[in-house]
Image (cartoon, helix red, strand yellow):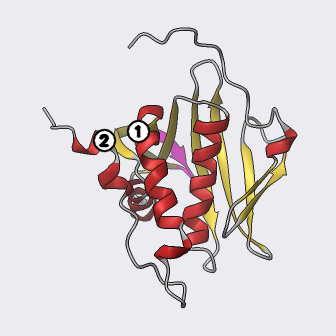
Amino acid sequence: DIVENWTPRLHPLANPQYYTLQGQYCRLELLNSKTNNNTIQQLFNDTAVGFIAFANVNQEYGTIEIGHVNFSAQLLRTRSATEANYLLLHYAFDILSFRRVEWPCNALNAKSRRAALRLGFQYEGTWIKSDLSRGQSRDKSWFSIVDDEWVQLIQEFQRWLSSANFDSNGQQLTKLNAAQINPRSNKKKE
């Protein structure tokens, strides 16, 4: 694809207005602005309950990673956790106009792989022996969402996050179908 009139994108830290991202169920606040190209957000309900970061920000090519996800037990598998990811995706695509958001993870981290797929990221492959961690060789699995896919995914996130999708006990009435909504998941594999 030819990308006409492309210009490098702003860094996530470029505008202090976005140091706090407010959702319906959670709030992301910038933890530290001097994090070696990482933008770490601390998640709050009323107290801090986790961390999530933008990493490997490539302004020239318009790519960015979501990573360093560390959610407390209080946050795991909640609509606040889903919304935290949605807020970062929304910021990357709709505010900063990045072309691609990546989700790399340890190939052995089944929970992270499932989370990526649930959020609509598409599996792209595994790099064998790509990292060393604590003296161990590590394979890295790669997932991504690109800007053309986000147009459809955002509607699914908004549908799922709507208060109408939760009963009086806060239980979801329907599942997040981002994996099925992503147009890349429906392309016939050759």
Name the residue rendered at 87%, 41% in the picture: 16
Q: Quadrant of residue 10?
A: top right
Whether residue 72 appears in magenta in the rendering, the answer is no
How crowded pointer 1 is (Cα within 10 Å; few <14, some 14-19, many 20+) is rated as some
Name the residue rendered at 55%, 49% in the picture: 133
Q: Quadrant of residue 69?
A: bottom right
- Magenta extent: 130-135
Q: Would you place residue 62 above or below residue 175 in this image?
A: above
Residue 33 drawn at (x, y percent): 85, 43
Q: Quadrant of residue 127?
A: top left
Left or right: 113 in relation to 25: left
Q: Would you place residue 22 above or below residue 95 in this image?
A: below
How crowded pointer 2 is (Cα within 10 Å; few <14, some 14-19, many 20+) is rated as some
Q: Amino acid at mark 1?
A: Glu
Q: CA distance from mark 1 to mark 2?
A: 6 Å
Most extreme residue toward the front is 164
The reply to whether callout 1 and callout 2 are in contact (CB within 8 Å) is yes
Q: Would you place residue 148 above or below residue 120 in this image?
A: above
Left or right: 4 in relation to 156: right
Mark 2 = which residue?
A: 183
Does residue 74 show up? yes
Does residue 77 show up? no
Left or right: 157 in relation to 184: right
Q: Disc 1 or 2, which lies upstream in sequence? A: 1
- Front residue of 129 and 122: 122
Mark 1 = which residue?
A: 149
* Quarter of the image with the N terminus in it: top left
Q: Amino acid at mark 2?
A: Pro
